[in-house]
Each structure stands twice: as structure tokens, then as C-alpha cells.
Amino acid sequence: PITVGRDGFDVAELEAHLVAGARPAAVYTVPDFHNPSQHSLTLEGRRELVRLAEQYNFILLADNPYRELRFRGEELDFEIFNNSSHVIHINTFTKTLGPGLRLGWIVLPERLVPDFVSLRARQDSHSSQLVQHAVAELLGATSTFFDDTLASARELYRQRADALSAALESEAPGVFEIDAPDGGLFLWPRIADDSIDADKLADDATAEGISYQRGSFFPTGPGTDADRRLRLAYGDTSIERL
């Protein structure tokens, strides 16, 4: 694992492994609003990560399902992932148009297209044609449905993210360190009160009917504080309930 922090994927940590002799076939990351850490890879980090992929000849899997869900701050360049022969850029409609669609897309180098077509043919041939036609209609040149949906979703998620952050501050003052998210579906607060046992907190919350993913469930790089964190998802929860 490579550490993911406030600046996203730790490119310097990866480079240190590469310099020491590591030769991965592929490197995976979520560049925008990472799950669970909520943060995004910096612009310089994106450029450097692509450069390392080209220099050390590995494939970078840039999985970007939350990119369109930015509700504040400046959008970070993603075209850099579409213009390298060593990057596979992955996205999906399941976080924007609807989870039940199970339809996504990839941008990949032409040299990999034949292998991907063959692999897909061996798996399930193709996605539902009904779903593909419906999405194509919603994305048509004369349709504003997708943009309108995103606009309302961004505002809704912003309200919910801010409500959850504010509730943690007001109901449990001094207990958590919180970075207000700029987008995505997750809050990744750190338990700042060292007297609190993170696992007992999760068990006690479950007993009260409140379930969340404890940070220790997620693979992390060395020296991270994930075991002191909570992944709280606000996407489908009303402000009142939050």
C-alpha cells in the first residue's frame, strides 16, 4: 500500500519504492475525492505520477468515479490521464446518474484496445443494451439532463457534507479533527481524543443503530492514522438524520 493523505496519493513514497528497485505491473489510485480519505491528488502529483508510469513502464489505473461530484474548490486537471500511453482512466455513471445502471467507461491507450475487447468478450460480452441506449439518450447533444442532475447532486451533497461536519463539531466538541470535503461522498474525521478506543466507539455506535466503516478496515500505508479514523458516508442520508 501507498499512503494517501491530504494531498492525495503519496507520489514521493511510490517513487522511493521504484528507486529502491520495485517494479509494479500496475499502480491503482482514486485521484479525486479518494475513498475513504476524501482528498484529491494535487495537480503536480498527477503530472509526476504519470511521469513515473512512463519512466518505469507500469500501467496507472486512475479510477475516478467521484470526479463530477465536486461541490467547491477548483477542478483539477484530469485530461493528463487521457493523454498517456501508460494510463487507463476509469469512470462510471453509477455515482452520478444512478447506482442501478452498472454502466461505466474507460479511456485507454490504443495499444491496449484489442486486449480489452478480448477480455470483455470473455467476461460478459457487453453491458445491457437497454441501459446503454437510455444513457445515450440522456447524454444526447440536445439534453441537459446529465448536467442538471449533477448540479442538483453537487448542491445536495455539499449541504449534507457541511451538515455532518457541523454536527460532529457541535455534538462532540474537541473529539474529532475534521477537514470539510470539497466533493465526493465521504467524510474521514480523525478521533483526536486519545482516550477514546476507536473499536469500542464503533461497537457502541452499532449498538445504538449507527453503522459506519471504521478506518482500520481500510488498507493503509505505513505510519498512517487510519485506525483513528471513521469513514462516514453522507450521500443517501438526509440532513435531519445526519
Image (cartoon, rainbow, N blue to C red):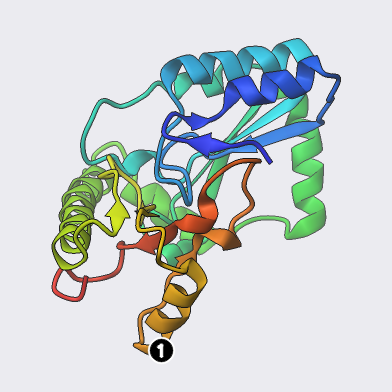
Q: Is residue 16 visible?
A: yes
Q: Amino acid at mark 1?
A: Ala
Q: Nearer the viewer, residue 162 or 3?
A: 3
Q: Write the residue at 75% across / 41% down.
A: 117
Q: Residue at x 41, y 34 (%)?
A: 6
Say if 209 sits above or below 108 in the image.
Answer: below
Of 45 and 86, the residue lying toward us: 45
Q: Secondary structure at mark 1?
A: helix
Give neighbour class at mark 1: few <14, some 14-19, many 20+ (Cα, 10 Å): few
Residue 125, picture quadrant? bottom right
At 22% across and 70% down in the image, what residue appears? 242
At which x and y percent is residue 176? Answer: 30, 55
Residue 44 x, y percent position in the rendering: 47, 14
Q: Quadrant of residue 28?
A: top right
Q: Which residue is mark 1?
A: 207
Residue 131 left/right relative to 71: right
